[in-house]
């Protein structure tokens, strides 16, 4: 098993090297190589493909627990708190109202126009409500966008993740709509979100106080690992949002902890460590996304896939424009970029793989989700820079 991961890592690093030389976003290259490996019989890679693509546990465990915690923690550590505060209205509108609108619009449209069942529609709406931080951060960082626009998009992608996961968890157990069920779902949503904030906040403050008592960058790096992985596990154990807890804990450690306890050397070493882990995690995630193609049955699903892509794109644009109508500080030229930049990624695939095999619509949802993720990365991801240039956003 270790050998498989070393080979995958070697492939990923090689592909990233080529992408950097060509000055292209490496996630796109990795997905394409993953698709080629997944679709083309390559004898030397047969066992690796089978291991990575035919084992739900591998993808879910590595993406959601190992990689996602690292990526969220790294991004949260580096987000300037003052900038987040200044843009809290925009970020909150997109992450909460925008995510909810996307969920409702996608669910309603797939139910009425694509004839999915109610539960299938709700699940797919939740899967598509997530703007994956792995995809968004890696592509936006390579573009050198306007600082405020970048903060808004990064902030949304981090906060939105936790909201979308909660909506997914509620959708999975929803078989019919009722007033009582809706109220229970709302209470569950509030519990999961507030619980994640509480756990992340408490342990972020605790880690910050501990780092103020020591000055040893290796110990403090280890402490950050305990914070990110520990809060995620603890939050999930209590059935609240692990994603939100990691983001909150990371922001607190990166701002308050930095101010009260980290020396410049420690700050540099901790950031370098997580930057390396985030890079390796990113590289492996996008390669794994491409490898998943070998397990999906696309037969007789063409029109549903095309219809779902159009619905998701339209829902994203409507959600962004409606949400930001309440914030006049966002320039009109930014809205198409925020809309088109709502990339889907590995989180959506990891979530859909977690649906029980007994669920009748799992294969359809997997095909639709995978197709939307690939479209997002290969089409939206590669044209985003051109859109920024066209709109002359500096």
Image (cartoon, rainbow, N blue to C red):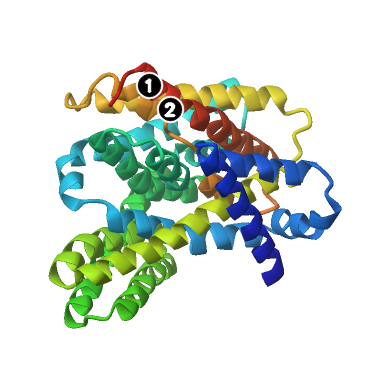
Quarter residue 167 falls in: top left
- Label tally: 2
Relative horizontal placement of residue 103, taking residue 47 as reference (left or right): left
Q: CA distance from mark 2 to mark 1?
A: 6 Å
Q: Residues within 10 Å of mark 2 (few under 14, many from 20)?
A: some
Q: Nearer the viewer, residue 109 or 209?
A: 209
The residue located at (54%, 21%) in the rendering is 310
Query: Which residue is labeled 2 in the image?
Result: 385
The quadrant where residue 371 appears: top right
**Is residue 20 or residue 328 the one in the foreground?**
20
Quarter of the view holding residue 156? top left
Q: Position of residue 131 (x, y in %)?
A: 43, 40
> In this view of the protein, which residue sits in the foreground, 137 or 121?
137
Point 36% across, 60% down: residue: 73
Q: Is residue 318 visible?
A: no
Instruction: Specify the quadrant that holds the N terminus.
Output: bottom right
Above or below, 257 against 39 in this view is below
Q: Residue 110 location in percent, x, y?
A: 56, 27
* Residue 77 position within the rendered picture, expressed as x and y whole percent measured from the top left: 29, 59
Q: In the displayed structure, would residue 181 be above or below residue 356? A: above
Q: Residue furthest top?
A: 390
Left or right: 209 as drawn, with respect to 4: left
The residue depicted at 33 percent of the width and 47 percent of the height is 159
Residue at 64%, 62% in the rendered image = 58
Task: Describe the element under mark 2 as helix, strand or loop.
Answer: helix
Q: Judge left or right: residue 388 versus residue 11.
A: left
Q: Are the residues tagged 2 and 1 within 8 Å (C-beta)? A: yes
Identify the residue position indicated by label 1 in the image: 389
């Amino acid at each position: 098993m270790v050998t498989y991961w070393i080979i995958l890592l070697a492939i990923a690093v090689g592909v990233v090297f080529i992408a950097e030389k060509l000055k292209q976003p490496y996630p796109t290259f990795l997905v394409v190589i993953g698709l080629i490996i997944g679709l083309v019989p390559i004898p030397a890679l047969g066992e690796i493909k089978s291991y990575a693509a035919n084992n739900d546990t591998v993808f879910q465990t590595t993406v959601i627990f190992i990689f996602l915690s690292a990526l969220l923690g790294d991004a949260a550590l580096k987000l300037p708190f003052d900038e987040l505060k200044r843009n809290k209205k925009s970020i909150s509108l997109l992450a909460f109202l925008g995510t909810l609108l996307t969920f409702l619009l996608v669910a309603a449209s797939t139910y009425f126009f694509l004839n999915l069942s109610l539960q299938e529609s709700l699940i797919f709406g939740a899967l598509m409500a997530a703007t994956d931080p792995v995809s968004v951060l890696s592509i936006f960082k390579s573009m050198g966008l306007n600082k405020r626009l970048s903060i808004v998009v990064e902030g949304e992608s981090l906060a939105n993740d936790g909201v979308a996961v909660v909506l997914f968890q509620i959708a999975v157990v929803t078989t019919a709509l009722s007033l009582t069920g809706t109220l229970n779902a709302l209470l569950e949503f509030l519990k999961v979100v507030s619980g994640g904030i509480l756990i992340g906040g408490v342990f972020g403050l605790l880690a910050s106080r501990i780092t103020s008592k020591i000055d040893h960058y290796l110990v403090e790096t280890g402490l950050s690992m305990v914070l990110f992985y520990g809060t995620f596990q603890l939050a999930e154990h209590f059935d609240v949002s692990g994603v939100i807890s990691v983001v909150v804990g990371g922001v607190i450690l990166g701002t308050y902890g930095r101010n009260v306890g980290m020396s410049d050397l420690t700050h540099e070493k901790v950031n370098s460590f997580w930057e390396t882990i985030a890079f390796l995690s990113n590289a492996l995630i996008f390669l794994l996304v491409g490898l998943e193609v070998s397990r999906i049955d696309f037969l007789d699903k063409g029109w549903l896939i095309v219809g779902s892509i159009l619905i998701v794109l339209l829902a994203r644009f409507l959600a962004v424009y409606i949400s930001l109508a309440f914030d006049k500080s966002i320039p009109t030229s930014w809205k198409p970029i925020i809309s088109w930049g709502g990339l889907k990624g590995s989180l959506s695939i990891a979530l859909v793989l977690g649906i029980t095999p007994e669920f009748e619509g799992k294969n359809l949802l997997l095909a639709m989700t995978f197709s939307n993720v690939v479209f997002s990365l290969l089409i939206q991801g590669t044209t985003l820079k051109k859109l920024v240039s066209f709109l002359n956003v500096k």
